[in-house]
Image (spheres, helix red, strand yellow):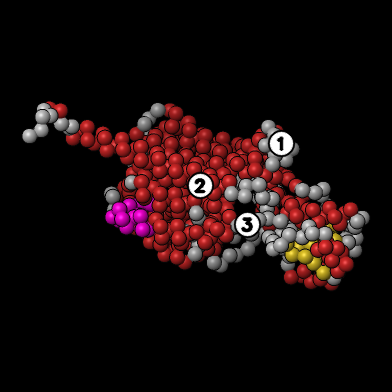
């Protein structure tokens, strides 16, 4: 018999508290590990040259440190206003290099992944939390965006953090959680307007679960008014950009969106897609309220995509616009994995990594050649030749600006022509007629010139290997 008195045995309440404490500690550790791992992914080759969108953003909206320009100017929808304003402040503080400017997005990516992993682990276990973190961190679209000087990572992190504050405010009625979610909602929407869609999904799910108080509606209304007020100075630019860009119909956009959301490759579609479906079914079976929450939030996403695809048909409609909803998909995958026995959960996580790794490695291997192209432009200028080009603004981060010539522009004064964003068939034919030869750099940058000049550039040793 034990010498320990029966009265000293732990009560069921104490056991439950101990288990809860272990789960909380485990979930925090899971979130931290996934967040740190994500940050390390963001730091790989962080000093590489800016790509097209990054260079455009840096040149027009960040360099010079003008918060006013960041919040009041829109060009070809390449400005994420609140993000650009924050980065402009960082620029004023001396954070001007590629490494310094990209650190913010990398941290935001880490925060988003860490919060998703923590949330799932807190509810259904650490392995499921790791699964959710893997699905989000290694998704090629999300990985690419939080490694770039773009606002998608900030918008996504703000949405996820706002969702966490919303969840906390269900039971904790302190004002702080309303203030936090309202502020984060403003940051998300004023960084990228499509974030409002994900926030609407979270709000609708909360309403369906009957966890919303009048104070929530007041918070959301105030946040919406503030966001609209911040965005208002951009209205004229947004209208002008929309008219200039026009429309186009993307026949395969819904399929592309669905595949990109779960990793694109068919192995990822199979493994992660099954986990997501399982997660949807699992949540829907918890109660009628959960079923309604899943149905309503899903209908909002599907309806918004359908309207943009079939009715609005904007020229600029890309999967990355919906990146703030990817954490929801990752969380669903985590909940789906949690339905399996523990050994099977580990196997599925390994399978997820295997399915996502090729796409992730391709993203990590990306090496824009804007810096090298600018060096070649400087060589040409030193020879006294005239340079012109198209969509070459990202090169202006590394060299002084040169004239941009439209598709029908006069090429007579151009000794060398630099194209950064690709060419239409008609313009390519014009350039092939005007110039004798060209160099193609990685990333689609093309330098056109006479054959003698191309030979000199190739002999300079400044042309990088593809």
Choose between 461 and 41: the one closer to the eye. 461
* Category of crowding for the residue at label 2, using alpha-carbon neighbours closer than 10 angstroms: few (below 14), some (14–19), many (at least 20): many
The mark found on residue 65 in the picture is: 1
- Quarter of the image for the N terminus: give it: top left
Dots 3, 1 in contact, CB < 8 A: no
The image quarter containing residue 295 is: bottom left
Magenta highlight: main SS: helix
Is the C terminus in the top left, top right, bottom left or bottom right quadrant? Answer: bottom right
Circle 3 residue? 366
In this view, the residue in front, 177 or 152, is 152
The residue that appears at 56% across and 35% down in the rendered structure is 226
- Per the rendering, the mark at residue 346 is none
Residue 178, compared with residue 235, is above or below; it is above
Q: At 22% from the left edge and 32% from the top edge, which residue is drawn?
A: 14
Magenta extent? 334-348
Q: Position of residue 225 (x, y in %)?
A: 55, 36
- Secondary element at tag 2: helix
> Which residue is nearer to you in this view: 329 or 266?
266
**What is the C-alpha distance between the residues marked 3 and 1?**
28 Å
Counting every numbered tag in the picture gives 3
Residue reaching furthest to the right: 384
Disc 1, SS: loop
Per the image, the residue denoted by label 2 is 38
Q: Is residue 244 in the magenta section?
A: no
| Label 1: few (<14), some (14–19) or many (≥20) C-alpha neighbours in 10 Å | many
Assess whether residue 342 is covered by the magenta stretch: yes
Disc on the earlier residue, 1 or 2: 2
């Amino acid at each position: 018999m034990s010498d320990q008195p029966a009265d000293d045995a732990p009560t069921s309440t104490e056991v439950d508290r101990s288990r809860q404490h272990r789960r909380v500690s485990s979930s925090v550790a899971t979130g931290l590990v996934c967040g740190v791992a994500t940050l390390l992914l963001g730091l790989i080759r962080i000093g590489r040259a800016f790509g097209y969108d990054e260079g455009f953003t840096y040149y027009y909206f960040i360099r010079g440190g003008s918060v006013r320009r960041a919040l009041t100017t829109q060009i070809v929808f390449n400005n994420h206003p609140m993000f650009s304003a924050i980065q402009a402040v960082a620029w004023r503080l001396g954070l001007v290099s590629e490494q310094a400017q990209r650190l913010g997005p990398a941290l935001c990516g880490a925060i988003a992944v860490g919060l998703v992993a923590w949330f799932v682990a807190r509810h259904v276990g650490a392995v499921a939390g790791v699964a959710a973190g893997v699905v989000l961190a290694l998704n090629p679209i999300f990985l690419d965006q939080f490694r770039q000087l773009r606002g998608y990572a900030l918008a996504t992190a703000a949405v996820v953090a706002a969702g966490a504050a919303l969840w906390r405010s269900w039971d904790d009625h302190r004002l702080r959680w309303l203030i936090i979610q309202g502020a984060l909602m403003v940051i998300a929407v004023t960084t990228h307007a499509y974030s409002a869609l994900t926030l609407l999904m979270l709000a609708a799910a909360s309403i369906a679960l009957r966890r919303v108080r009048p104070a929530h509606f007041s918070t959301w209304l105030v946040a919406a008014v503030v966001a609209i007020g911040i965005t208002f100075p951009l209205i004229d630019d947004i209208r002008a950009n929309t008219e200039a860009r026009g429309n186009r119909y993307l026949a395969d956009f819904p399929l592309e969106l669905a595949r990109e959301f779960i990793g694109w490759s068919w192995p990822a579609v199979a493994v992660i897609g099954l986990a997501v479906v399982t997660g949807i079914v699992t949540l829907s079976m918890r109660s009628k309220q959960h079923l309604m929450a899943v149905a309503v939030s899903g209908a909002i996403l599907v309806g918004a995509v359908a309207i943009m695809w079939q009715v609005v048909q904007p020229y600029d409609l890309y999967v990355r616009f919906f990146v703030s909803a990817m954490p929801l998909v990752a969380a669903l995958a985590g909940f789906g994995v949690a339905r399996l026995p523990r050994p099977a959960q580990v196997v599925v996580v390994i399978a997820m990594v295997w399915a996502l790794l090729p796409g992730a490695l391709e993203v990590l291997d990306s090496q824009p050649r804007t810096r090298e192209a600018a060096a070649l432009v400087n060589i040409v200028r030193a020879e006294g030749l005239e340079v012109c080009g198209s969509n070459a603004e990202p090169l202006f981060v590394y060299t002084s600006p040169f004239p941009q010539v439209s598709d029908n522009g006069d090429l007579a004064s151009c000794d060398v022509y630099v194209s950064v964003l690709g060419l239409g068939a008609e313009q390519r034919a014009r350039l092939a007629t005007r110039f004798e030869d060209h160099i193609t750099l990685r990333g689609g940058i093309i330098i056109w010139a006479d054959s003698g000049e191309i030979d000199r550039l190739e002999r300079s040793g400044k042309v990088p290997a593809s």
